[in-house]
Image (cartoon, rainbow, N blue to C red):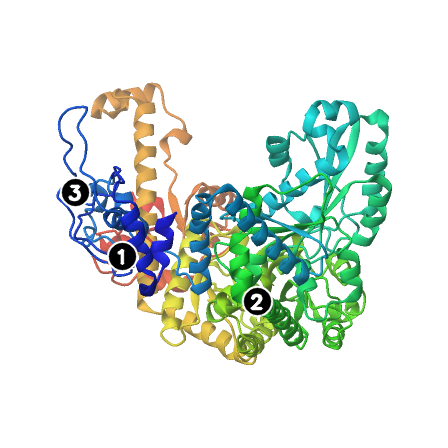
Amino acid sequence: MISHYLLSCSAKERPFQTKIDNLSIGIKSQPSPASTKGSEHSADSAVPEEPQPSSGVGGEHSAMPEGAGSKRASVSVSGVLMQLEQLIVSDEWTRKEQSDVSAAPHGNAGKRKRADGPRLTELGRSLVTSYSLKAYIDLLGVNHRQSIASWLYGNTSSALAGLFRFSNALVHCEDSDSAAVHSVRNGIGHAVRLALRHVYGPDLVTNGWRTFVEQGAPVVYVSPGLHMDLAPYLANEFSIADCVTVAKAETPLADVEGRLNPADLEERLALDFDPSSNRKPLLVVAVVGSAIFGQNDLVSRLIELRAKYGFWLHVVGQGLAALALKEPTETLVKVLTQADSFTLPLAQWLGVPAAPVVTLHRPLEDYKPTYREKLDSLPWWVATQHLTLKRMTDTIETAYYLSKLMLKGLSNFPRIELFGIPNAADFAMKVYKGSFSAPTVLIFKYNYYDTAVVRRNSGGSNAEAIITESPIVSAEDVEYADSLNSWLGQGLISECRALGLHLIELGGQHGTAFRFCPLESAAAAGTKPEDVQKFIKQLGETLSIVDATVRARRRLPDIIAGHPTLCRLPIQKWAGVGAVCYVPSIVKETVPEEWNEKQRQQVSYLNLELVHSLRATDSAFSSGDSAIDVSCVKFGMLADEKDLDDLIAMVAERGKAIEDSAQYMEHLAQLIRQGIEAANEDLRKENDERLMQEGVIRQLPIMGSLVNWFSPMGKETTNIKGRSFDLKTGKILSTDVLYTHRLQMECDGDAAALPMVPKTPIETPLMPHLFASTAVPDAPGESPVDLPAESDPEKANPEKVDGNVAQ
C-alpha cells in the first residue's frame, strides 16, 4: 500500500519516503516475476535511481546460495520499491514467458514498450494515497484509530447527506469495481443487508437461516429498468432464492426498456405477504433515470405500498443526481428522500478515479457501522475536502446544462427523432422554463421514414406505434435507416469525442441510435458547452447531405427507368443513394434473378470495369455485391439531389463505351473459346461411349462391315448429336432440336426454309458473334473473370460452334 503513495507523491513529499526507509531497514527482499536489470529506471518514477547491490531484487536472475537454510542479504526499502515500480509502469515482465517465435516476423519485436497506466489528476493521486493511509491508520492504537474513523465517517456522512438533501443519512462505501454495473450491484447488496435487519429484526443475528423458516423466505423485487441480473449474486451472497423482476408497464418503448408496473408489483406483494405462502417481501429496487431512456419508476406509488407491506425501498439510477442541483424540483426532493436508501455512482458523475461507490441510507436502531466500514469513507472525505460541496454541485449542474443544450439543439432538426419525447421543441421550452428537469440521457437518431407518416403522427404520444404499423416502414427501410445512422456516427463521433457519444442497438424497428449521457462522461472528459455547439453545427451540415441523399434515393427508380441498360439492385448496409447494374446487351432480355453463373460473371466483369473507370472521375463510386451475387455500381452520398441525373447518365454512357471496347470483346471471345472447348469435350465423351456400345469388332475394316450387314445398328446409335454454344446463357446445348426440325421440314417438303441455327427462347445477339469472328490474340489480357484461354484462333469462329463442324 505504501508503494502507491510513493509512486504518486511529488518531489516535495519525498522526505516521508526517507522516514519509511529508516523504519524498514530490516525488511527482507521477496522474489518477483520481474526480470529487468537494476539499472533500468522509468522516466515517470518518483523514486531516485540508486545503484543495486549484487544480490538485490532488481538483478536479473539473482543466484540463490546453495543449501536449504541459506539467507539473502537484506536491502533497503528503496530498492524494493524501485522493483515494485518497475512492475507497475512496465509490462515487460508479463511478456517474459512469450517465445521469440511469435515475435520473429516483426522487425522491432525485440523492443519492449512501457505499459501506459492511468494518468491520475491531483485528486486521483490523493485518493490513491488515502488507501495507503488507511493501512497506516490501522497501525495506531485502538482508541486513536477508532476516534479517527468515527470522525471521518461522521464528517463524510454529513457532507454527502447534505449534498443530496437526505437528512440524517449514513454513508456506506464499497470498493469500486472495474465495471460500473458491478459497483452498483455491491451497493444493492448493502441495501439487502440493511433490509434483512429491518424486516427480520434481531432474530436473524441469533438464529440465522432458521429465521427464514419461521417468518418466511425473503423475496426481492427488481424493476425491469435495472438491466442487471441480481439472482446469482443474491443467491451466492445472501442465500436468497427469490428474485422477482416486476412486469413492465405498457408504454410505447416497453419493447426496449420498460418501467415498473405498480399494479403487478402490488399483486405479487399481496400473494407473498400472506403467511400461508411462507414468503416475505424484503426489498424493492426502483430505478430513477434508467440507463437507456432515462425513465423513472413511480416512486410515490411504491412509498404507499411500503407503508402497507413493510419492505425496504432502495433506489438507483442517474436521476438521483438531480437531488444535488442548486434548485431541484420540490416534488422530486419530497418523494425521493422518503426512500430507505440510494446507491450513487458519484465517482462517475464527478470524474473521480479510484473512488468507492456511495450508498446513502436512513439510520437503523439495531445497526451500527463497524470500524472498517467507517474507515472506508476516507477516500470520500478526501474528495469532499478537495472538491468542496460547491464544486461537486457545479459539476453536476454542468452535466445537466449540457443535456439542456443538446436537447435544444436537436429539437431544431425535424428529422431527428428523440426517443420518449413526442414533441422535442415543446419539451425543450418547458425544460428551459424550469417546469421539467433536463433528461439525464438523450437517445436520438435520424428518422428516415416517409415524411407524410411522420407529419401525420407527430402530435400524438403513440407516434412510434403508428409508424411501426405503417406499411411504408418495410424491412428494407429499417435496414437503410440503420445504415444512415451508422454513417452519421462514423464522422460525428470521431470528431466530437469529448461529448462521450456512442451508438447503441435498440433492436426491432427502432434500429441504431445515438446515446448522450453527460453525467457519465462530461466530468472525466472535460466536456464544455462549446463542444455541444460544435456538434450541433456539424450535425446540421451533415444532415443537409443526408436529406439530399434520401430524396435522391427515392427518385432513383424513376431516373433508372429512362435508361434501359441500367437496373436497380438491392444492396445491404449501404447509406448512399443505392446501387445500379449495367446490363450488357447479351443478357438484357433475361430477368436478373434468372441469370446463371456464366451470365453473372459477364455482368460482374463489365460492372467492375465500369467502377474502375468511374472512380477516376469521382471517388464516391464504389463496387459491391448485390443480393443476387452480382457486382454493381454503388452511389455514395450526394450534396445535391439534382446531381443524380447527371451521374446516372454518366454511368450509362461509360457502361456503353466499355461494352463496345476491344477489351470487353476480348472477354467475350474468351467465353466463346471456353464454350468450344466444352463442346469438343462433350463430343469426345459421346464418341467414346458410342465406340463402347459398338464393340471392337465393328471397328475392324472387313469384320466391321460383315457384322454391320448381319446386325445393323439403329439410327440413334450411329448418329452423334452435335453441340451449340449459347452466348447469352453461356450453356452448351445439344443440336437434337435442329435435327428434329430438319426431319419435320423434309417431310413437309420445305427443307430449304430450315434455319441453320437452333431456335432458343432468347435469340443470341449477332454483334458479339461477328466481333468474336475476327482475329483473337493467342495470349489474351488479364480479366477479373478467370476463364481458360484457347490457343487456336480458328476456334473462336462463332460459325463453328455447332458440334458437327467442331468434330
Q: Quadrant of the C terminus?
A: top left
Mark 3 Cα within 10 Å, few/some/many (few <14, many 20+)? some
Query: Residue 553, position in %: x, y?
Result: 58, 70
| 421 sits to left or right of 570 | right
Q: Which mark is residue 26?
A: none
Q: Which mark is residue 47?
A: 1
Secondary element at image label 2:
helix
Q: Residue at x 58, y 53 (%)?
A: 151
- The x and y percentages for residue 725 are 39, 49
> In whole angstroms, how far apart are the C-alphas of marks 3 and 1?
20 Å
Q: Earlier in the sequence, mark 3 or mark 1?
A: 1
Q: Is residue 19 above or below residue 395?
A: above
Q: Residue at x 34, y 69 (%)?
A: 661
Q: Which mark is in front, 2 or 3?
A: 2
Judge from the rendering whether residue 335 lies leftward or rightward of residue 759; answer left or right.
right
Q: Which residue is mark 3?
A: 60
* Residue name at image x 42 percent, y 31 percent: 716
Residue carrying label 2: 388
